[in-house]
Image: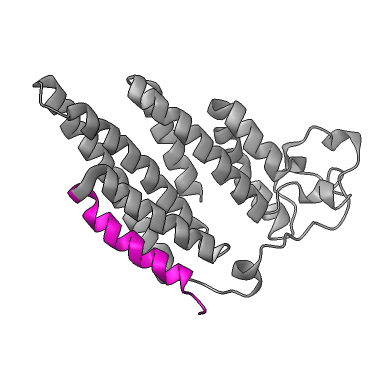
């Protein structure tokens, strides 16, 4: 998930410096980032110490370790340029605290006087079930589609310079393909925790990406549609 969030941050920063079309893409990326952070924070048990009642002293009142998944999501949504980098910095410590059940380096037990909270993550962590094939196919499909979208934007930009017809449509389609590719990557990332939902997300990504840029998205379509169908039919 770190890779996905870093990718969202990088694309968002680049799009901030672009045209109105890419600025619109930034808004979409901010929303996707907030959703991704919410589900990831929920998966690693963010705020578990405060929920467990073991963070009750004044020292920890405003600590980021007490922020709930919803708080993280809202902070990223409203203050994306600050919230997303902050979450990326704190994520490993949150994981260490809530999943490994140990105190993060540099954090005193006066802040965490009780037994570390153990997050309940569903079937992926508790049963050890792994969907490696679905994850790899979905991740590859999303990454390839991501770059295919940028290629389409580049071709559309060149076409607009020379006055080619429908160049603007190609650019918008490329931006759409990037967004749906990111959704496909998110689907791959959550396939072990929310298998069917991830499968549907990858299927939607495959179909919509193909609609956006047609042949540019064929390889990604194949990878994502296979991963999505496999995930949806898992355990049937």
Say if the magenta span includes residue 219.
yes
Residue 64, picture quadrant: top right
Name the dominant secondary structure of the magenta segment: helix
Identify the residue at horizontal 32%, vertical 35% (top origin): 175
Total marks in image: 0
Identify the residue at horizontal 46%, vertical 68% (top origin): 231
Which region shows up in magenta? Answer: 215-236
Give the x, y percent position of residue 16.
40, 23
Which of 220/72 is in front? 220
The reply, left or right, for residue 62 in relation to residue 37 is right
Which of 171/75 is in front? 171
Establish if 182 lies above or below 198. Answer: above
Which of 9/221 is in front? 221
Q: Residue furthest right?
A: 57
Identify the residue at horizontal 18%, vertical 50% (top origin): 215
Identify the residue at horizontal 69%, vertical 60% (top origin): 100
Judge whether residue 114 can be spotted in this image.
yes
Say if the magenta span includes residue 79.
no
Give the x, y percent position of residue 108.
80, 44
Q: Residue furthest bottom?
A: 236
The reply, left or right, for residue 72 in relation to residue 140 is right
The reply, left or right, for residue 164 in relation to residue 57 is left
Please name the colour scheme applied to the rendered image: one colour
Give the x, y percent position of residue 83.
60, 31
Residue 147, picture quadrant: top left
Judge whether residue 142 can be spotted in this image.
no
Give the x, y percent position of residue 166.
17, 29
């Amino acid at each position: 998930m770190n890779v996905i969030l870093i990718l969202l941050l990088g694309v968002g920063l680049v799009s901030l410096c672009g045209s109105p079309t890419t600025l619109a893409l930034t808004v979409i990326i901010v929303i996707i980032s907030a959703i991704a952070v919410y589900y990831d924070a929920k998966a690693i048990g963010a705020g578990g110490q405060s929920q467990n009642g073991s963070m009750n002293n004044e020292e920890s009142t405003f600590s980021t370790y007490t922020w709930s998944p919803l708080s993280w999501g809202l902070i990223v949504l409203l203050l994306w340029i600050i919230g997303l980098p902050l979450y990326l910095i704190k994520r490993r410590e949150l994981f260490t605290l809530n999943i490994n059940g140990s105190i993060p380096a540099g954090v005193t037990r006066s802040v965490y006087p009780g037994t570390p909270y153990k997050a309940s993550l569903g079937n992926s962590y508790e049963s050890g079930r792994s969907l490696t094939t679905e994850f790899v196919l979905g991740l590859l499909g999303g990454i390839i589609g991501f770059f295919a979208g940028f290629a389409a934007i580049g071709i559309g930009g060149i076409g607009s310079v020379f006055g080619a017809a429908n160049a603007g449509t190609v650019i918008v389609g490329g931006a759409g393909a990037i967004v749906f590719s990111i959704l496909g990557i998110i689907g791959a990332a959550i396939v072990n925790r929310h298998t069917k939902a991830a499968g549907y997300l990858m299927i939607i990504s495959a179909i919509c990406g193909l609609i956006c840029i047609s042949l540019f998205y064929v390889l990604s379509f194949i990878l994502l549609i296979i991963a999505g169908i496999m995930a949806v039919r898992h355990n049937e």
